[in-house]
């Protein structure tokens, strides 16, 4: 049976973290993306940055295998691409993940302090 959202589910889905994403995450994910391109490491990451009762807005970053002449025995990135494109339907509801913005900001700030001077060796 396919899961459909109730009105109760929709009233809690209004959020906008686009500025937080831009200020705290975007530069880091672009660095990861550039490293993955350089090192030929396939990856997929998507972030729900804002949404309302009718739509969720995502920022998606990816390095796939095809353009990089990489083969994977079990290419799970294809499934990520299907989900991202909207061509995959979930059949059951999973428990929501919740975290307060204060807790999230503290995690990001702690990470900034821990890794801000860490060298990155790409060779």
Image (tube, rainbow, N blue to C red):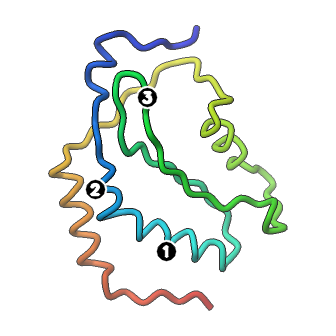
Give the answer, above or below, for where 60 lies relative to 7.
below
Question: Which residue, given by chain and number where applicable, does mark 2 sit on?
Answer: 20
Q: Earlier in the sequence, mark 3 or mark 1?
A: 1
Residue at the image position 41 percent from the left and 22 percent from the top: 54
The C terminus: image quadrant: bottom right
Residue at the image position 32 percent from the left and 10 percent from the top: 7
Q: Secondary structure at mark 2?
A: helix
Question: Which residue, given by chain and number where applicable, does mark 1 sit on?
Answer: 31
Residue at the image position 24 percent from the left and 60 percent from the top: 107
Residue 17, x across and y down, in percent: 29, 47
Say few, some or many: other residues with alpha carbon within 10 Å of mark 2 (under 14 / 14 to 19 / 20 or more). Answer: few
Give how far apart the Cα atoms at labels 3 and 1 are.
28 Å
Between disc 3 and disc 1, the foreground one is 3
Q: Earlier in the sequence, mark 3 or mark 2?
A: 2
Give how far apart the Cα atoms at labels 3 and 2 are.
19 Å
Say few, some or many: other residues with alpha carbon within 10 Å of mark 3 (under 14 / 14 to 19 / 20 or more). Answer: few
């Amino acid at each position: 049976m396919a899961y459909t959202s109730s009105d109760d589910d929709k009233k809690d889905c209004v959020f906008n973290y686009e500025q937080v994403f831009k200020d705290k995450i975007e530069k880091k994910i672009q660095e990861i993306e550039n490293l993955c391109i350089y090192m030929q490491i396939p990856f997929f990451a998507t972030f729900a940055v804002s949404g309302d009762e009718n739509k969720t807005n995502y920022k998606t970053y990816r390095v796939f295998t095809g353009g990089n002449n990489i083969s994977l025995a079990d290419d799970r990135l294809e499934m990520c691409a299907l989900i991202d494109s909207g061509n995959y339907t979930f059949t059951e509801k999973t428990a929501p993940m919740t975290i307060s913005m204060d807790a999230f900001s503290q995690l990001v700030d702690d990470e900034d302090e821990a890794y801000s001077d860490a060298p990155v060796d790409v060779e």
